[in-house]
Image (spheres, rainbow, N blue to C red):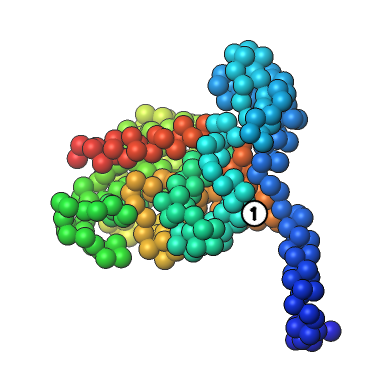
Amino acid sequence: MKLKEIKQLILELPKEQQLLLFKEIEISTSEDKILLSNSRIEILNNRQGACPHCRHTKYVKFGSKSGSKRYKCKKCKKTFTEYTGTWMAGIHHKDKIDLYIELMVEEKSLDKIKDKLKINKKTALDWRHKILSSLQDESDKPFEGITESDETFFLESEKGKKVTHRSARKRGGKAKQKGISNEQIAVIVTQDRKSKLDLTVATKGRISKADIENAIGHKIKSKRTILCSDSHVSYKGFAIDNKIEHYPLRSDLKQRIRNNVYHIQHVNSTHNRIKKWINQRFWGVSTKYLQQYLKWYKIKEHLKHSKNFLNDFKQKTTISIEAIQEYRKIENWYLNLISTPI
């Protein structure tokens, strides 16, 4: 039976039967979707969680509170619920958070989300960044083999904030000065040939050896990593300090590849995809939240081959019990970034 024929049969049904049918379809299609609260309870009941107060892994069930399951830590004796420490802590309208994440995964605008859920736009923005604060680095394993690293730049943006010290820009605008200046925010992008990826907002203006060290120093092992970069002196110094085999590429000599294998083409391709995603999907983002959106992009890349992206994304957001702490650090992180001396 063709789709048009099915549609015609449905339209011939009485209105009440149509509504019942739509409801049953909605229930059946949502059966494979996990609920965030249930996922947290499952983690805790299976003894896979930890006390959000002291990180101790021994705790017992301790009744319930305001409709939430309660647990008690055996070490610090404090109680907590399935939401404590997570991005869902203290949130009203918890019945809307699952649908919110579905809309977020579909990359709907904040205006469309607020209209759909009947919530304030500021609430929609806060939820987005609380969720992004819950996403953790996927692996502590170091980069292996040939590893490319290069910086790209985003124009500093105060999107969403009333600007008084300069004229407002439209759709991003342009820098007043040519080249790299204190109007530009440097993002260090590093990836190996096994698709391990790191995206770090580093500084204003040109990067230094210390910026590279802060971004990827803990993920580099001298005997397991071969670094490819441009010929910037900061990368040379970083490689020498960490005793890493290093292949710099001279752009002034139009050098694109060495020995037919050492290049930074993958990382430059990532630069283009990130900028296209941020500029076309969100019409640019505030510098304050740039690192948050880079985390979002990174999790998208990590899960791009997932058979059930939505469920996997939801589960990633339920693991961290430091999400609220990370969310509260955003403002200080931003103030430190923009006060970086040039």
Judge whether 107 appears above or below 147 on screen.
below
Closer to the camera, 330 or 250? Answer: 330
Q: Tell me the element at label 1.
A: helix
Q: Residue at x 77, y 55 (%)?
A: 31
Say if residue 307 shows up in the picture: yes
Judge whether 239 appears above or below 80 on screen.
below
* x and y, in percent, of residue 86 in the image: 56, 35
The residue that disc 1 covers is 310
Q: Quadrant of the C terminus?
A: top left
- Residue 215, quarter of picture: top left
Q: Quadrant of the N terminus?
A: bottom right
Q: Is residue 299 left or right of residue 235?
A: right
- Residue 144, quarter of picture: top right
Closer to the camera, 95 or 103? Answer: 95
Q: How many marks?
A: 1
Q: Residue at x 43, y 32 (%)?
A: 217
Q: Residue at x 15, y 51 (%)?
A: 165
* x and y, in percent, of residue 14 in the image: 78, 80
- Which amino acid type is marked by label 1? Leu
Q: Is residue 60 left or right of residue 201?
A: right
Closer to the camera, 29 or 285? Answer: 29
Closer to the camera, 217 or 319? Answer: 319
* x and y, in percent, of residue 218 in the image: 46, 31
Q: Residues within 10 Å of mark 1 (few under 14, many from 20)?
A: some
Q: Is residue 139 left or right of residue 59?
A: left
Q: Residue at x 54, y 58 (%)?
A: 117
* x and y, in percent, of residue 335 in the image: 28, 38
Judge whether 103 appears above or below 12 on screen.
above
Judge whether 334 appears above or below 78 on screen.
below
